[in-house]
Image: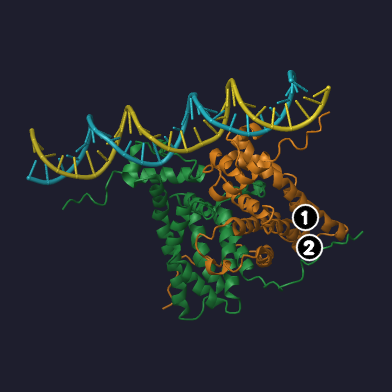
Chain colours: A green, B orange, C cyan, D yellow
Amino acid sequence: MSLTEAKQSPDTRERILDAAEALFVEHGFEATSMRMITGRAGVNLASVNYHFGSKEALIQEVFRRRLTWLNEARLNALERFEQEARGAPLKAHQIVEAFFGVSLRMAADTEHGGHTFMRLLGRTYTEPSAFVRQFLADEYAAVVPRFKQALFRSLPDVPPEEILWRFHFMLGAMSYAIAGTDALQLVAEYELDEKDPEALARRLMPFLLGGLRAPLAGQAVKTKEKNPRKAA
Amino acid sequence: MSLTEAKQSPDTRERILDAAEALFVEHGFEATSMRMITGRAGVNLASVNYHFGSKEALIQEVFRRRLTWLNEARLNALERFEQEARGAPLKAHQIVEAFFGVSLRMAADTEHGGHTFMRLLGRTYTEPSAFVRQFLADEYAAVVPRFKQALFRSLPDVPPEEILWRFHFMLGAMSYAIAGTDALQLVAEYELDEKDPEALARRLMPFLLGGLRAPLAGQAVKTKEKNPRKAA
DNA sequence: GCTCGTTTCAAACAGTTGTTTGAATGATAC
DNA sequence: GTATCATTCAAACAACTGTTTGAAACGAGC
């Protein structure tokens, strides 16, 4: 009955995961070599393969250790709202809060690596590599249908596919806001004095809700001016 | 006076650029090797270094050949609206149309590679590598200030930094919508029968405008319930 | 014919990649 | 002490990376 079970190794596993997480954000998966990771973690090169098996498995574990918790938190928030509602459809802003609010709060945590991880996660939604996509799909399999359902009930007058697309757009706005590097120097002059991570949530949430509740497009018109006669 | 100037080489330059563009979208910069590119293009390995100098220079040229045109189109659209307005501030939807509408129209072009390129561009906004970020900043240097200015004039009651953040959010929603892989299988069941690229613009534009014009957050309140007494 | 500048080609370059190996080290149980 | 386990370590592995080289092939101009 060896009780050496919870602590398999002193902390080299965690040190590897932390180093890998930070380096993945900084350089991406491919550009981050095992030697960079082990060097930063201060462990031997072979220990990654010993503890995780392969680089691919390491990447998955970097996500798994935080994503599981995040998705549980999102589901808990949703269920709390549903209990309060006693069977009535939720308000749209509650659903948005349960999914994106929880995410933004994790992104605001700069102490325990939550911010680093959310930057990584946001970028990963556009990750081309197949195994990462598959892994994400599995991790979200229990979450996405629940939120879909809640949104359909909340907005019965909006076509379901329109709701899903807007959820998609919201996810993009958030991911980009967290992971984006402001490559265009758009808000460059402001984000310096806006290091407060809470500020992002205050700014983003109204935007998301405004987009979600925007009036449906009138099918045609509006962008139909093919030959723009110059008003001179 | 040799007139062999416009057509330096038959078409291997273009073939390399096309192959690189497609492979970068598929696998990313780092994961795409020169041998993959030259293999797909059907040219010799050394021809990339001969025509472009280095892989880094090739990446820049992949962007430059389309981004210059795109940004000119965006500026032209903006200037056309400004001429029509005769000095009056533009409508917000016109500015959004000039920037994002033009982009979405390029993304809708599946014939000449516009779609492929926009997917690549969207992903690149979150690209970590420094030289790509610097390159993007330079390419957009002439465009971003003009659109900033137009938005400030159009929405005089909204604080400038709020406008910029929302422009940032809009850029994220669009980039992700174009580049995103729907890793969460969110709209998976719908996007199959929605291959029509025009549909994306019809769905996205109202979302962007709804977000841009959303009411400002009331500074505090609303998300202030730290201890959620369960309504039982 | 020859020549000149451009482009293509196969081969090799040195360096890095992820992974494996087998011995060394450590700690625990008997 | 010895035996047994998990962990660490330096070294090496083959495969792949971007780049360079020098000769070959090409296409005009004369």
Q: Quadrant of residue A201?
A: bottom right
Split into 4 quadrants, where in the image is the C terminus of chain B? bottom left
Q: Position of residue C28 (x, y in %)?
A: 16, 44
Chain of the residue displaying label 2: B
Q: Locate residue B53 relative to residue B93 in the image: left or right.
A: left
* Residue neighbourhood size for the residue with mark 1, other residues' Cα within 10 Å, grouped as few (<14), some (14–19), many (≥20): some
Find numbered disc 2 in the image and state the secondary structure of the residue it sits on: loop
- Residue of label 1: B150
Residue B227 vs B146, above or below: the answer is: below
Q: Quadrant of residue D6?
A: top left
The residue nearer to you, when weighing B17 against A29, is B17
- Can residue B126 be seen in this snapshot? no
Residue B41 vs A162, above or below: the answer is: above
The three-letter code of the residue at mark 2 reads Lys
Work out which residue is located at the far right of the displayed protein and give it: A232
Mark 2 and mark 1 lie on one chain; the one further toward the N terminus is 2
Q: Position of residue B21 (x, y in %)?
A: 62, 46
Q: Quadrant of residue A232?
A: bottom right
Split into 4 quadrants, where in the image is the N terminus of chain B? top right
* Residue neighbourhood size for the residue with mark 2, other residues' Cα within 10 Å, grouped as few (<14), some (14–19), many (≥20): some
Same chain assignment for discs 2 and 1: yes
Instruction: Please name the residue shown 75% across and 57% down the image.
Output: B98
Instruction: Please name the residue shown 44% across and 39% down the image.
Output: A33
Q: Locate residue B228 relative to residue C23 in the image: left or right.
A: right
Identify the disc placed on residue B91. 2
Q: Position of residue A51 (x, y in %)?
A: 32, 45
Chain of the residue displaying label 1: B
